[in-house]
Image (spheres, rainbow, N blue to C red):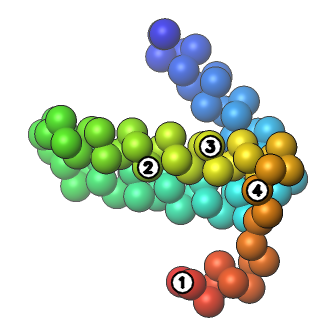
């Protein structure tokens, strides 16, 4: 998959969640973690670190997809704030 195609797919998937505030908060939190990890790393991630990041990403996106499909109930925003 080309870089442009990958970027388009990421934007498309995130855009499909714009109407779900909790999902957007999860996406934002995850992106910030990935960005922070990328900035802190000047070298390439180890295989175990890559697997952990990819696993977290897969899990987050599956949860977001399930919320969007109505298969998973989202939590109230107040509960997320309390968690922070």
Numbered circles on residues, count: 4
Q: Earlier in the sequence, mark 4 or mark 2?
A: 2
Task: Name the image quarter holding residue 65.
Answer: top right
Residue designated by label 1: 84
The structure residue drawn at horizontal position 31% and vertical position 47%, both measured from the top left corner, is: 52
Q: Give percent across and percent down for residue 12.
A: 72, 30
- In front: mark 2 or mark 1? 2
User: Label 1: few (<14), some or many (≥20) within 10 Å?
Assistant: few
Q: Is residue 3 above or below residue 62?
A: above
Q: Mark 4 and mark 3 in contact (Cβ < 8 Å)?
A: no
Q: Give percent across and percent down for residue 2.
A: 48, 10
As drawn, is 65 to the left or to the right of 36?
Answer: right
In this view, the residue farthest toward the front is 71
The structure residue drawn at horizontal position 70% and vertical position 57%, both measured from the top left corner, is: 24
| C-alpha separation, residue under disc 3 versus residue under disc 4 | 10 Å
Residue designated by label 4: 72
The structure residue drawn at horizontal position 78% and vertical position 77%, both measured from the top left corner, is: 76
As helix, strand or loop, the secondary structure at mark 1 comes to loop
Residue designated by label 3: 62
- In front: mark 1 or mark 3? 3
Q: Is residue 73 above or below residue 31?
A: below
Which quadrant is home to the C terminus? bottom right
Q: Mark 3 and mark 2 in contact (Cβ < 8 Å)?
A: no
| C-alpha separation, residue under disc 4 versus residue under disc 1 | 21 Å
As helix, strand or loop, the secondary structure at mark 2 comes to helix
Residue designated by label 2: 56
Q: Earlier in the sequence, mark 4 or mark 1?
A: 4
């Amino acid at each position: 998959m080309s870089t442009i195609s990958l970027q388009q797919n990421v934007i498309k998937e995130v855009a499909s969640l714009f109407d779900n505030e909790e999902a957007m908060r999860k996406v934002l939190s995850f992106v910030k973690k990935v960005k922070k990890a990328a900035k802190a790393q000047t070298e390439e991630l180890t295989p175990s670190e890559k697997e952990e990041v990819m696993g977290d990403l897969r899990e987050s996106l599956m949860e977001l997809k399930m919320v969007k499909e109505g298969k998973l109930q989202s939590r109230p925003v107040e509960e997320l704030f309390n968690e922070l």
